[in-house]
Image (spheres, grey):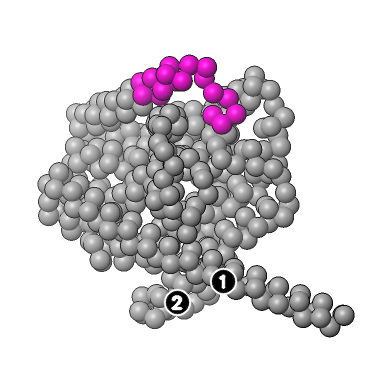
Amino acid sequence: MVAKKRQSNFELLRIIAMFLIILHHSVMHGLILSGVLQAQSIVKRIEITQLALFGKVSVGIFVMITGYFMINSQYSPAKSRKRLKNLWLQLFFYSTLILALALSRHWVVLNWNNGVQAILPVLTNLWWFATVYVLLYVVMPYLNLLLNQLTKQQYSKLVIILLSLGSIYPTFFRNYNAISDSDIDNLLLFVMFYVIGAYFRKYTFKNAHKERKIAWLTFISTLALNLGQASLLGYISYRTSNMLYLERSEALNNTSSITVTLLAVSLFVIFKHINLQFSPTINNLALTTFGIYLIHDHPFIRQKLWYEWFNIPNLFAKYSFGSFVWHVLLIVTLIFISCAAIEWCRLWLFKKLAKTTTLVNKEKIQVILNINK
């Protein structure tokens, strides 16, 4: 199975981003959302939140890659419907397959909620990223029409407006923000990253070396500043016994924060300038990344992964931070490879089914033509 000749530097970035997303989920679901981290020291909380940071960064990277490749796609209702259909089929395949697995293993009992979620995974928000990604796909053709009509100056102003609304404002006024963290808010964030990714496809710096240098400086300085503010606010929380300072620091790791945006954009630009020859292996592996996300972050699988099969809270309690990180990296690698193999099988199956359907349709057409002779 040979992937389309897309730039392997971005496909490598897509692979790395998915690895970091799994790493993020291991500590987010295994420690943070489970409440385990609340009882830990300030130092451990800072260590874990910094470890989880790049999962948020990777969300923006994924959407920017989509913008970079899709901005020049010609609008076609048929193509748009085909993309949405393929995306929906992938979601439906895994939502029903995993429900069937959960029922057969007696993890859950069939009820109205999980039945509807399996049939309508997008409308029921079974996977939040997938739901917002489908919404982005719906508006993408119209978004492309708009962006391709703008001058560079108008486009730059749009980027600034979207950055202000989607990243800068939520960073500094999150506690006072009356707008909920809904799919509409996430769609605005996705549109922002899409527009930024598309911008780098349409317009490039005249001095590539300077652009790469700025990207590296932005990445390193943002990472250092983020660690610095976490340490400072953590120290203030310790001295004042007021955890609000630490919680404010942790909020800067949200997907919409300016910290995450700067890290995502700078990493995207860094990989944009990596001169990597076309690699079928990298490109084909990158094809499995969305499937990897759907498998490992399905609610039924998620519960088993982090609390039963690998028991992340137990590993965190048992080992030092350094040993814990090594164990988690091995677990994440295993999950990545296993889920990639499953998704590869699905891709193979769907390709065979598509060929079979095409042959059947051709035979039907031939029969009709013979009858009409």
Residue at 69%, 43% in the rendered image: 74
Q: Residue furthest bottom?
A: 371
Please give the name of the residue rendered at 40% of the width and 75% of the height, measured from the top-left corner.
101
Find disc 2 in the rendering and name its residue. 100
- Label 1 crowding class (10 Å Cα cut-off): few <14, some 14-19, many 20+? few
Observer able to see residue 213 = yes
Q: Nearer the viewer, residue 100 or 283?
A: 283
Q: Which residues are magenta?
A: 200-217
**Where is residue 357 shown, x and y percent of the image?**
63, 72
Q: Residue at x 23, y 39 (%)?
A: 47
Tell which tag, 1 or 2, sits nearer the viewer: 1
Give the answer, above or below, for where 99 lies relative to 191. Answer: below
> The C terminus appears in which quarter of the rendering?
bottom right
Most foreground residue, 357 or 256:
357
Q: Which residue is mark 1?
A: 353
Is residue 235 toward the left or the right of residue 147 in the image? Answer: left
